[in-house]
Amino acid sequence: MVIPQHVAIILDGNGRWAKSKGMPRNYGHVRGAKNLEVICEDAYNMGIKYLTVYLFSTENWKRSKDEVDALMKLFRSYTKTCIKTARDNNMKVRVLGDPTALAPDLQKSLKNLVESSKDNTGLNFQIAINYGSRDEIVRGIRKLAADCRDGQFSPEDITEEMFAGYLDTAGIPDPDLLIRTSGEQRLSNYLMWQLAYTEFYFTEVPWPAFTKEELQKAIEKYNGRERRYGGIKEE
Ligand code: IPE
Ligand code: IPE
Ligand code: MG
């Protein structure tokens, strides 16, 4: 079986999962964060080299203040735990998204996480937090335009590869497989440039209930697809 090099996940359904158990949404987020640690390890043991997860979108600020506050609190503790797991499991962590809207202490912990794990050689783990694809593209264009204005190159010199280097995912290969849990079949502003030729897998299973077996199922389905452009399907 071919193991996709890069798997991207939209971790969805924490709230609905909690509701189905008669629990508050935030309980779903706590259990979702715990599950992420488990899946991270499973992914690496299965041979996945890059795992990119969507933790908080630029649109998620529109949720109730209570929920946003609870999520930020959870990210604080998650980031601290992740510093330890990155060290123990040799993970290299990168952050996608615009950190400037996050509280200064969270920005600092995220920086610390990235910095302390930068020489690790195991799983490449990307966390998308205050991430939106349109925002990422606009931020990239701003930097590109500034470099152009400063005379580093002219507009005719701009290529797809060059532009990709201005995105938060610079240097990271495009995802081979996208998984979205909990039934919705939309991108919700996730990695729109990077997913141009990615295979999509949707499952009804909500994120807190997503297991290693579910991940294996997604990979089996991926293996049955006839990939185009950049695929790694073996004959
Ligand atoms: C995904 O679960 C986690 C975040 C977006 C932070 P949701 O909170 O979207 O859960 P549902 O989709 O409402 O069930
Ligand atoms: C997408 O899930 C964002 C994350 C998983 C962080 P949402 O639950 O926020 O997406 P929509 O609102 O259903 O599109
Ligand atoms: Mg949702």
Image (cartoon, rainbow, N blue to C red):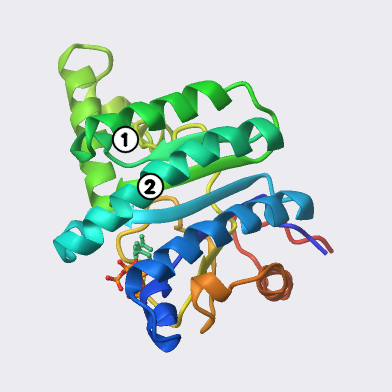
Q: Residue at x 32, y 25 (%)?
A: 157
What is the C-alpha distance between the residues marked 2 and 1?
Answer: 8 Å
Q: Position of residue 106 (x, y in %)?
A: 31, 35
| Residue 160 image-quadrant placement | top left
Q: Quadrant of the N terminus?
A: bottom right
| 52, 60: nearer the viewer | 60
Residue under pointer 2: 75
Element class at badge 2: helix
Residue 130 vs 167, above or below: the answer is below
Q: Position of residue 154 (x, y in %)?
A: 24, 21
Residue under pointer 1: 106
User: Upstream in the sequence, badge 2 or badge 1?
Assistant: 2
* Residue kind at label 2, given as amino acid type: Phe
Mark 2 near mark 1, Cβ–Cβ under 8 Å? yes
**Residue 91 falls left or right of residue 97:** right
Q: Residue at x 24, y 30 (%)?
A: 104
Instruction: Tell me, yes or no, if residue 31 can be seen here.
Output: yes
| Residue 29 image-quadrant placement | bottom left
**Residue 24 falls left or right of residue 206:** left
Instruction: Please rate how many residues cluster around mark 1, counting C-alpha atoms within 10 Å: few if below 14, some from 14 to 19, many from 20.
Output: some
Q: Position of residue 233 (x, y in %)?
A: 74, 61
Element class at badge 1: helix
Q: Quadrant of the C terminus?
A: bottom right
Q: Position of residue 70 (x, y in %)?
A: 29, 57
Which quarter is ligand 1 in?
Answer: bottom left
Q: Residue at x 42, y 38 (%)?
A: 95
**Badge count:** 2
Instruction: Please rate how many residues cluster around mark 2, counting C-alpha atoms within 10 Å: few if below 14, some from 14 to 19, many from 20.
Output: many
Residue 164 vs 181, above or below: the answer is above
Residue 127 vs 228, above or below: the answer is above
| Residue 54 image-quadrant placement | bottom left
**Residue 60 falls left or right of residue 170:** left
